[in-house]
Amino acid sequence: MDQELKIICGDAIQEMKKLPDKSVHLIVTDPPYNLNKDYGNNQDRLAFDEYITFSRQWLTEAKRLLTDNGTIYVFMGMRYISYIYTVMEQELDMTFNSWITWFYTQGIGKTKGFSPRHDDILMFTKSPKHFVFHLDDIRVPQKFYRSVNNMRGANPGNVWEFSHVHYCNINRKPHPTQKPEGLFERMILASSNPGDTVLDPFTGSGTALRVCQQTHRNGIGIDINPEYIEMTKKRLAEEFRGFDSIDERMKRVPNDLNDPNIREEYIRNHIEWFLKNHPDAIKEFMQEVRQKYETKMIDSGQMNLFDLCGTNPVTATS
């Protein structure tokens, strides 16, 4: 499958105006929150009315660019999210689908008031009924295996826990608001197909394009800072070792995998379904499999599964 990843340096609104109507299947973006962040060649500091006008303008272009079955995800801070919601629903007549909370464990510390520990993501669709959503591609493992349940897993819900991309992370870039790849992975897998075009008009460190690259989507990234454009180009040229973040539930091993045939089928499928973009998590998953089921797997002759996954300490050192 041919893939195109386009990186554009310029003003988001002006560059979006150059793109054809209904040419984008999905928009996933983290626009400025107007919190006085330093983005190198521009400052995130507008008067209130100016910021709402700016938001209205780029969101208007976003709706024009979306295909009729398209979806948009917008990261937004608490101060402005209600206004952005109103613009999208009341002014642009888009259809609200989900208000997602990204929960993280570390953030700004406050001594007067409660320290923030989440950002929010608004999901809107262009059509109220006809839009792409692949639940099977984003399920999370069940706590307990039941034959009446979907072996593929459960709906992840609208509260997502992903760690920040810490400064010690090998994938950390010199960008003030870099978002975890696992967040974008979930949105892109859920709301687009391989070969679709995904747009991020505020591409920043290039997270959306990196995820598009590894999930076989076409991507368009726009940013006004040429340093971030170069950063994104270098990031796309790096060797892929797995996405830099994961929902910890993806490593969860269901209880009650007592039937040997079901157990083997599940273990093999789990790695393909949940961990194919997270190879560094496979070892931890298989360690939990060993803790829960080693005795039963010895009895059923299934220890070769650890060889297949490269997690058998005996054969790995022989």
Image (spheres, rainbow, N blue to C red):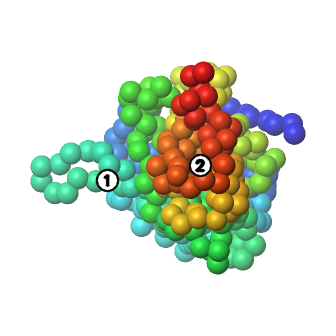
Judging by the rendered image, the residue that carries numbered circle 2 is 298
Specify the quadrant of the image occupied by residue 163: top left
Q: Is residue 87 left or right of residue 129?
A: left
**Label 1 – label 2 distance at C-alpha:** 44 Å
Secondary structure type for disc 1: loop
Q: Is residue 61 visible?
A: no
Nearest to the observer: residue 106 or residue 19: 106
Percent across and percent down for residue 32 are: 45, 45
Q: Quadrant of the C terminus?
A: top right
| Amino acid bearing label 2 | Ile
Q: Residue furthest front?
A: 299
Residue 248 place in picture, x, y as percent: 46, 51
Along the viewing direction, whichever of 159 and 12 lies nearer the viewer: 159
Q: How many marks?
A: 2
| Pointer 1 local density, CA inside 10 Å: few below 14, some 14–19, many at least 20 | some
**Residue farthest right in this picture:** 1
Residue occupying the point 71% across, 43% down: 215
Quadrant of the rendering where the N terminus is positioned: top right
The label number, if any, that marks residue 117 in the structure image: 1
Q: Amino acid at mark 1?
A: Arg
Q: Is residue 38 above or below residue 276?
A: above
Residue farthest to the left, as pictured: 112
Mark 2 Cα shell of 10 Å, populated few (<14), some (14-19), many (≥20): few
Q: In the picture, residue 167 is in which quadrant?
A: top left
Residue 297 visible to the viewer: yes
